[in-house]
Image: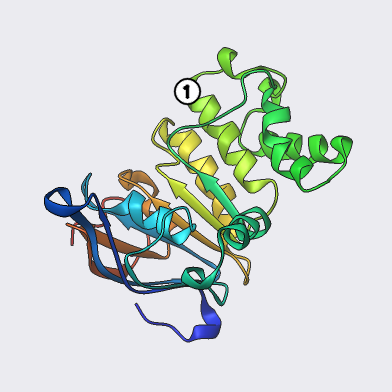
Amino acid sequence: MIHNQGNVGVEIRGARKSFGVGHTRTEVLHGIDLDVPFGEILLLVGPSGSGKTTLLCLMAGLLDMDSGSISVFGKRLESLSAEAKTQLRADSLGFVFQQFNLIPALTAQENAAVPLQVRGVRRKEALHRAGALLERVGLGARMHARPTDLSGGEQQRVAIARALVSEPRLLICDEPTAALDGETGATVMTVLRETALREDRSIVVVTHDSRIFHFGDHIARMADGRITSVRPVVPGESNGGNN
């Protein structure tokens, strides 16, 4: 999937990644080429162990490549210092990973407001914006509950609200609907969709949930550390990724 550079938020060329050394070295990604266009949701699908989460970590600058190049909003990650990568993540990236990583002592609303307060937004404004997002994902009545009082699905929605609250240009999601029922998953994807439709933003979603395929724009399939196909989502698709 190759686009005009001006339309691409993330451009990956020849990305390779291995773990271990010597006889224990295992190559996980074998020369990945992939574009993530602005204004789209890219679904990344494939069996467990195919390298999807590793690719997300490379994209976010959380892991370094062995070789290849990754450009995020025109910045080559392999040329950035660790400090510059950290700043890029703080300024422009949002994350929804399988581990929710909520702060136990904070309420749902306070957890969702953390990224804004880190950026210096005043507490009152940060809590207001976090509360509005929690309302949109169906947690308005639970925003004052702490993580230990929330179900797994509710914690997932808090993590999603936290990722969205700072309006990131690139949102990276690893199985965002895995702990949600069909109706709630659709609600969450609708919120994500509204964010992705802006011209200067992109969303990457790793998923095994065929119920949400129709929310995407393209499906990239991975197997054995390679991108095996990239295709547009068919309107109304609910069992995609197998063609």
| Residue 37 pos. (x, y %) | 48, 72
Q: Quadrant of the C terminus?
A: bottom left
Which quarter of the figure has residue 155?
A: top right
Query: Which residue appears at 88% of the width and 41% of the height?
Result: 122
Of residues 215 and 72, which is closer to you in this image? 72
Which residue is farthest left? 23
Q: Is residue 182 above or below residue 22?
A: above
- At label 1, counting other C-alpha atoms closer than 10 Å, the crowd grade (few under 14, some 14-19, many 20 or more) is some
Q: Quadrant of the N terminus?
A: bottom left
| Residue 223 pos. (x, y %) | 19, 57
Label 1: which secondary element? helix
Of residues 189 and 229, which is closer to you in this image? 229
Of residues 148 and 193, which is closer to you in this image? 148
Q: In this view, does 166 lie above or below 184?
A: below
Which residue is farthest top? 149
Relative to 230, 184 lies left or right: right
Relative to 202, 230 lies left or right: left
Relative to 90, 192 lies left or right: left
Q: Which amino acid does label 1 sit on?
A: Gly
Query: Which residue appears at 11% of the width and 51% of the height?
Result: 23
Residue 114 at least partly seen: yes
